[in-house]
Image (cartoon, rainbow, N blue to C red):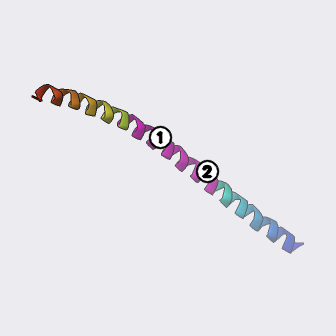
């Protein structure tokens, strides 16, 4: 009986550790998603600035 209790305790600890790791992965995924969104926004802004720069340079071409 003691073996069963010890095994159940170990299984419970392992399950808790897995749950903790899954929560950490979920948090990292959420963080990555935010960074990807920020990168997309920055890319759009950079593209817009490049277009504006191109138009400005075109004014000086002979």
Q: Quadrant of the C terminus?
A: top left
Q: Is residue 34 above or below residue 49?
A: below
Q: Is residue 31 above or below residue 9?
A: above
At 12% from the left and 29% from the top, the residue drawn is 61
Estimate the x, y position of residue 38 in percent, counting from the top left: 41, 38
Q: Would residue 26 appear left or right of 37 to someone viewing this image?
A: right
Residue 30 among those drawn in magenta:
yes
Give 29 or 36, whichever is nearer the viewer: 36
**Residue mark closest to the camera, 1 vs 2:** 1
Which image quadrant for residue 43?
top left
Estimate the x, y position of residue 25 in percent, counting from the top left: 58, 52
At 62% from the left and 57% from the top, the residue drawn is 21
Give the residue pinned by disc 2: 23
Q: Which residues are magenta?
A: 21-42
At 24% from the left and 28% from the top, the residue drawn is 52
Which element type, helix, strand or loop, lies under badge 1?
helix
Estimate the x, y position of residue 55 in percent, counting from the top left: 21, 27
Give the residue pinned by disc 1: 34
Q: Quadrant of the N terminus?
A: bottom right
Give 51 or 28, whichever is nearer the viewer: 51
């Amino acid at each position: 009986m003691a073996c069963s209790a010890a095994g159940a305790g170990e299984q419970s600890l392992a399950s808790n550790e897995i749950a903790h790791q899954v929560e950490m992965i979920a948090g990292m995924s959420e963080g990555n998603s935010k960074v990807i969104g920020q990168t997309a926004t920055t890319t759009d802004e950079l593209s817009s600035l490049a277009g504006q720069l191109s138009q400005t340079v075109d004014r000086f071409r002979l």
